[in-house]
Each structure stands twice: as C-alpha cells, then as structure tokens.
Amino acid sequence: MRTPFKISAAVAATALALAGLTACGGSSSGSAADAGDGRIQIMVGGLDKVIYLPARLTQQLGYFKAEGLNVTLLTEPAGVQATTSLISGDVQGVVGFYDHTLDLQAKNKQVESVVQLAHAPGEVEVVSTKAASEITSPKDFTGKKLGVTGLGSSTDFLTKYLAVKNGVKPEGITPVAVGAGQTFLSAMEQGSIQAGMTTDPTVAQVVNKKIGKVLVDMRTPEGSRQALGGPYPSSSLYMNTDWVNSHKDTVQKLANAFVKTLKWMSTHTAEEIAAKMPADYAQGGKELYVQAIKDTLPMFTKDGVMPADGPATVERVLKAFNPTLKNATIDLKKTYTTEFVKK
C-alpha cells in the first residue's frame, strides 16, 4: 500500500517534494494560502480510497489545469487529521466527510462544504471470519474491539451511531484506530479487531481474501437510509468559510472542475474510471479494483449539490452519541453552500 504522509507547516516543503502524490507542481504553505497564482493545496482523507476517487480523477482528467488551477493533492489516512491541517492553515481545502463541518461548528470553527461529492457514506462495517458467529448485527457490539480509520474520524462517528441505534452504549465498545488498506487487513487477520468500518478498495480485499464479510453496507443511498434513516452526505470538498468568501473566483474554478468530474463519472463505466486512475491504486489487482469502484459508484452525486434532507440526517446521527453536539445549536445552512455548484 502507498504510504500516506502527514503535513504540517514545518514539513510542508518536504511533503510537497514527494511528487508521487502530486500531478501538479508544489508550493509552500505561505504562497498557496494566497491562491493568487492558482496554487491550491487540498488534503484528502486517503487518496487511494474509492470514496474520495473524484479528487485524484479530477487531476487525472486535467480539469484542475483546464480551470487555470495548480492543485497539489496531499493525503492523510483519516479525515480527522485532514481537518486538523485545514484548521491550522496548512491546506486550503479538504476532501473528506461533510459531518466534520457540524462537529467543527460546535467547536466555534466555521467550515463549509462547497462541493458535495456523495449522498451516501460509502462505508461498510465488516466482521472478521473468526468473529462472524458472535457478531451478527451491531446489537452484538458490546465489549468488542471495532476498527476505525482514526479516533474522531467519520468511521468512528458512524460506528458509535450504529452501536447506539442498536441499543449499545458508546462506552460499551472499544474503537481501535487501524487506518485503511493493509493496516486494516492486518488488524483483522491478527484479531486486533473483531469488526471494523472501512471503504473500498479495502472492503473488496477483505471479502476476496475471506478475512471477513459484510455486516452493514452503506455504499448506496438505499443502504444509507436503511442503516442511518436517511441520505448521509459524506465525501465533499470543504473549506474555511472565511477563505471561501475571500477567494470566490478560485472556489468557483474548483467547483467547476469537480462537477465536470462527477458528470464524467456518471456517463462512464467502472472499467473506464479505473483506467484513468494510477496503477498502484489497484492494490488487490485490476479486476478487484474495478469491482470496488462499481460497488461504490452509487454513492456519488452527479452535480455536486447537497441533498435537501441530508444535513438534517447527519445532525441527527451525530447528536445521538456526540457529547459536543448533543446540546449544541447547529446552523445547518452555514455548514454547506450550493452557490458554486449551481453556477
């Protein structure tokens, strides 16, 4: 698996020298923050995850360049770390889960989704083959070690909600940060976790290698409604609201590029999409990667627009277990904007 790296202000220059993660030129944090020359840094919560595929695909299709943007894509194994990079000013945008915008507003930080890439989580709760007989639904989570990408990540949020919804208290489970890809597979094989939440292509590998099986599938809007009670907008491009308001031309160009990609995805097959992606993203082989894309495609929007009742579902889910949000008043209209995608 490709090794993700972390970026902070102190190591920005070093990180950007790793050209393997970037198809466009790098820049220092200071020059990128201005964006006057079209240089933008976007942190992705796992570049090779299929749920965040539009980020790299937009670059591969040349749509950023066509808009006059020089976009550098960076990667973190979990969305929560990507959010930290945004708040600290190391990057201008994050491709990660929309639910972080609500969590941050409760902490007095104003961040908003400017392009909604998906209307379902794309997440799957898988149970290890060894524990399959004792965990047949989330009702059996009590006392179990459950894998998440990172503590405070969206997989952590959703795992806790599945527990609470099925009568298990959040403190009754043990979330274990295991990342995705090979680290997740190893944790499940070694018994460090009995079940866990992950995405494709990791899901495809878990099933193909018979390490585990699918317990809860949220890769489609139907699966999302069944598990969470409504559409759950997930993968998005979110940015600091102040930055959006002071760089509207740049944000419009980013929205144009991403929406073009979503439309392109809606008219092409999984095979055609896979062919555009870097070869090393197909960790379990080309056929398995194509299947992973095919299984995940239903989660993506075609126009980047936030589903009307999506934000309310996310708020209800988060308030069910998150003490920070439980009694907080969230202004949902400030957590996203459709201004740019509708143009």
Image (tube, helix red, strand yellow):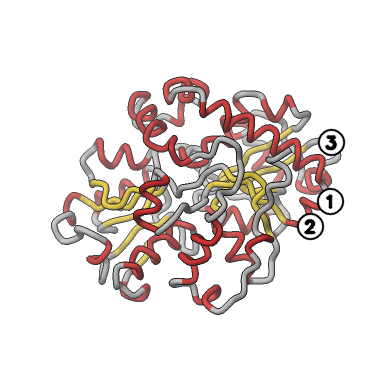
In the picture, measured across the screen, residue 302 lies left or right of residue 240, that is left
Residue lying furthest bottom: 327
- Say which quarter of the image contains residue 160: bottom left
- Identify the mark at residue 299; answer none if there is no mark: none
Instruction: Name the residue that disc number 3 marks.
Output: 37
CA neighbours of label 2 inside 10 A, class few (<14), some (14 to 19), many (20+) = few
- The residue drawn where x is 72% and y is 42% is 340
Secondary structure of the residue carrying numbered label 2: helix
Q: Amino acid at mark 2?
A: Asp
- The residue drawn where x is 40% and y is 51% is 224
Give me the C-alpha separation between circle 2 and circle 1: 6 Å
Q: Are marks 2 and 1 in contact (CB under 8 Å)?
A: yes
Instruction: Name the residue that disc number 2 marks.
Output: 242
Give me the C-alpha separation between circle 3 and circle 2: 19 Å
Secondary structure of the residue carrying numbered label 1: helix
Residue 264 location (% of width, % of height): 57, 26
Of 191 and 237, nearer the camera is 237
Q: Amino acid at mark 3?
A: Asp
Instruction: Name the residue that disc number 1 marks.
Output: 246
Residue 139 location (% of width, % of height): 25, 66
Q: Is residue 52 above or below residue 227?
A: above
